Amino acid sequence: MTQKSRRAIIAGIAGQDGSYLAELLVEKGYKVLGFLKKDEDTSYLTRIIKDVLLEDTELVRKDDII
């Protein structure tokens, strides 16, 4: 797998652990997609928010993840 094709999906990206993981992966060249709850605080992501794709979703709702 080339570095260009590395991708990661992070559920809970707006939390402390998810944001640290996202930052690490962005630094390593990953394209990061992060799931967060509607209206969730993204203050942990301020350093990398322009480098990740964020998607509002509820992982407990089947229609949101299909």
Image: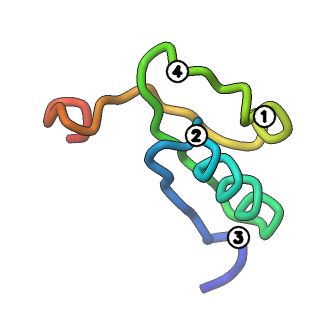
| Amino acid at circle 3 | Lys
- C-alpha distance separating marks 4 and 1: 17 Å
- C-alpha distance separating marks 1 and 2: 17 Å
Q: Residue at x 80, y 41 (%)?
A: 48
- Compared to 15, does 2 lie above or below? below
Q: Residue at x 57, y 64 (%)?
A: 7
The location of residue 5, given as percent across then percent down, is 62, 71
Mark 4–mark 1 CB contact (< 8 Å)? no
| Amino acid at circle 1 | Lys
- In the rendering, which numbered label is found on residue 4? 3
Most extreme residue toward the left is 62
| Amino acid at circle 2 | Gly
The location of residue 56, given as percent across then percent down, is 43, 26
- C-alpha distance separating marks 3 and 2: 26 Å
Label whose residue precedes the other's in the sequence (2 or 4): 2
Label whose residue precedes the other's in the sequence (3 or 2): 3
Q: Secondary structure at mark 1?
A: helix
- Work out whether residue 23 or residue 8 is closer to the camera in this orientation and state it: 23
- The quadrant holding residue 30 is bottom right
The residue identified by callout 4 is 40
Mark 2–mark 4 CB contact (< 8 Å)? no
- Viewer-nearest of discs 3 and 1: 1
- Viewer-nearest of discs 3 and 2: 2
The residue identified by callout 1 is 50
